[in-house]
Amino acid sequence: MEAIERVCKFLEDAETYYLATVEGDQPRVRPFGTVLLYGGKLYIQTGKVKDVSKQLAVNPKAEICAFKDGKWLRVAGELVNDDDRAVKVAMLEKMPSLKAMYSADDDNTQVLYFKDAKATFSSFTEAPETVTF
Ligand SMILES: Cc1cc2nc3c(=O)[nH]c(=O)nc-3n(C[C@H](O)[C@H](O)[C@H](O)COP(=O)(O)O)c2cc1C
């Protein structure tokens, strides 16, 4: 499995991850669950009306953390907006519960992909492993 596929699978299996952004000198963090591998890129989904989206528009630097079965994963990088409708459709198809709140053609749905990502798998028992994508 490619590194980015392993990262995606870990996030899927963990179900919930925590997305940190920056607002001025204040870190902000919240639970997220959306994840999609599309066209070789790792995407997440949010709404443009949310503070998280506004923070990323000012400063795209972000980090996510997920924990499962004694292992944790951190992915640090930049989250880049992608207006490609096909990715939004694929995200909504993968996570149909989103359709109650979002559609590919509303002005709110936003998908972003990780650029210059450094992903580190850690545990208490093994040495950390870092991959990039
Ligand atoms: C388990 C869980 C998963 C969530 N997944 C997402 C998600 O993938 N995208 C999203 O925009 N909001 C998601 N939310 C809701 C956000 O955490 C919530 O809207 C948060 O307030 C957004 O951060 P902000 O207030 O700083 O903008 C999720 C909430 C929970 C409890």
Image: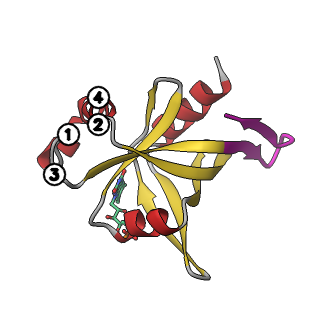
Q: What residue type is labelled 3?
A: Met
Q: How far apart are marks 4 and 3 (CA)?
A: 18 Å
Closest to the observer: 20 or 80? Answer: 80
Counting residues from the start of the chain, the first of labels 3 and 2 encountered is 2
Mark 1 lies on residue: 104
Closest to the observer: 24 or 130? Answer: 24
Q: Is residue 70 visible?
A: no
Mark sitting on residue 101:
3
Q: Is mark 3 within 8 Å of ligand 1?
A: no
Residue 34 percent location from the top left of the image: 38, 44
Counting residues from the start of the chain, the first of labels 1 and 2 encountered is 2
Write the residue at 59% across / 54% down.
65
- Left or right: residue 32 compared with residue 77: left
Q: Which residues, given as a range, are shown in magenta? A: 117-133
Ligand 1 sits in quadrant: bottom left
Q: Residues within 10 Å of mark 2 (few under 14, many from 20)?
A: many
Q: Distance between the residues labelled 3 and 2?
A: 13 Å
- Secondary structure beneath disc 1? loop
Residue 82 percent location from the top left of the image: 40, 42
Q: Which amino acid does label 1 sit on?
A: Ala
Write the residue at 49% across / 48% down.
80
Residue 107 percent location from the top left of the image: 19, 53
Q: How far apart are marks 3 and 1 (CA)?
A: 11 Å
Outermost residue on the bottom side: it is 25
Mark 2 lies on residue: 88
Q: How crowded is mark 4: few (under 14 residues within 10 Å), some or many (20 or more)?
A: few
Q: What residue type is labelled 4?
A: Ala
